[in-house]
Image (cartoon, rainbow, N blue to C red):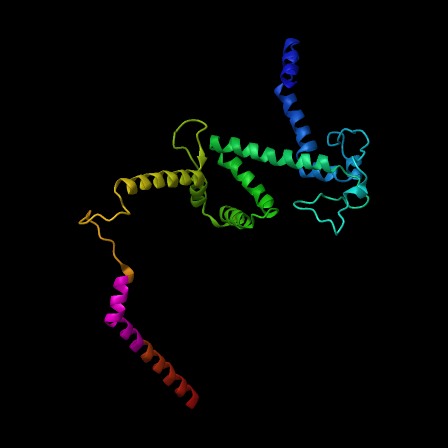
Amino acid sequence: DLLEHVDELAAHDALPTLEDLLGHARVLRECYATQGAYERSLDKSEHDDASQTENFPEGLTWTPPCAPEALIIEPDKPLNGPQPHKEPPGFDGDRVLSNSIIFLREFGWWIEMNYAIPEGDVGRLLEIMKINIFTFAGTANQNYVGYMLDLYVLLQFECSPDLKDGLLDNLLFNLEGGAGDFVEADITQEWFNRWLEEVLLRMYKDEELHQFRSGRSMGHAAVNCFDRGYERLDGGKMKEYVERSTEYATLLREMELLRSAQ
């Protein structure tokens, strides 16, 4: 147990220094939470050639729980839902380890973002957003790829310094004014939308908006643009349009005839 281990170290006055802990963290990150670690986990030769700090500890020889041929899906026996992944012939990596590395890496990005946002650290948030360009490109959320690329290009190449500062300053809001109370601007907008929706629904109910109340008027008459437009077109606007269009078409025809006669 980690807590018991720390308590035991403290009892023997053997707690590691912050520098020691940061050093261990760097080793763990390089070994278990990077793209390089993922690639090494899928290729035994890369694993064997890795440096000591990047090399995985050797485990026991892997014995599949069933014969490899039992994992082959026969064409006449389709499975419902996701089908099991089948490694290519000669695979000598560790797929389970690679899956764990992907999880730890993406979980680390998520943790970084979840610390950066409440602290109002737009710089750290932007670094994770850059990474998200690649992660979204690898998923079905292709609309987010375009949005993230547009945002990056805008901030990096198109914005003036003042506009860039303004955009970054408005990525996070702190409505409470306290430390650790920053939230994303889009979520804040969603909160406002929900609040407005609740207020409007309550007002609609109180005022019986969708019920007929004879003589009701509250000083505002919405313009029926469709009805007004129909009356204007029927009252002469359509005739004016036809006459103007006809004159224009006649002029174009005369110009074409003159050009042909030359």
Is residue 230 one of those drawn in magenta? Answer: yes
Left or right of 147? Residue 245 is left
The residue sitting at 56% across, 50% down in the picture is 142
Where is 16 relative to 220, above or below?
above
Q: Secondary structure of the magenta portion, mostly?
A: helix
- Residue 76: horizontal and vertical position, in percent? 74, 52
Quarter of the image with the N terminus is top right
Is residue 128 one of those drawn in magenta? Answer: no
Could you tell me if residue 230 is visible in this image? yes
Single out the residue that lies furthest toward the front: 76
Quarter of the image with the C terminus is bottom left
Where is 108 relative to 15, above or below?
below
Left or right of 2? Residue 176 is left
- Residue 102: horizontal and vertical position, in percent? 66, 37
Q: Which residues are magenta?
A: 227-244
- Residue 116: horizontal and vertical position, in percent? 51, 32
- Residue 16: horizontal and vertical position, in percent? 65, 17
The residue sitting at 29% across, 61% down in the picture is 226
The residue sitting at 44% across, 29% down in the picture is 181
Left or right of 257? Residue 214 is left
Single out the residue that lies furthest toward the bottom: 261
Q: Nearer the viewer, residue 211 or 103?
A: 211
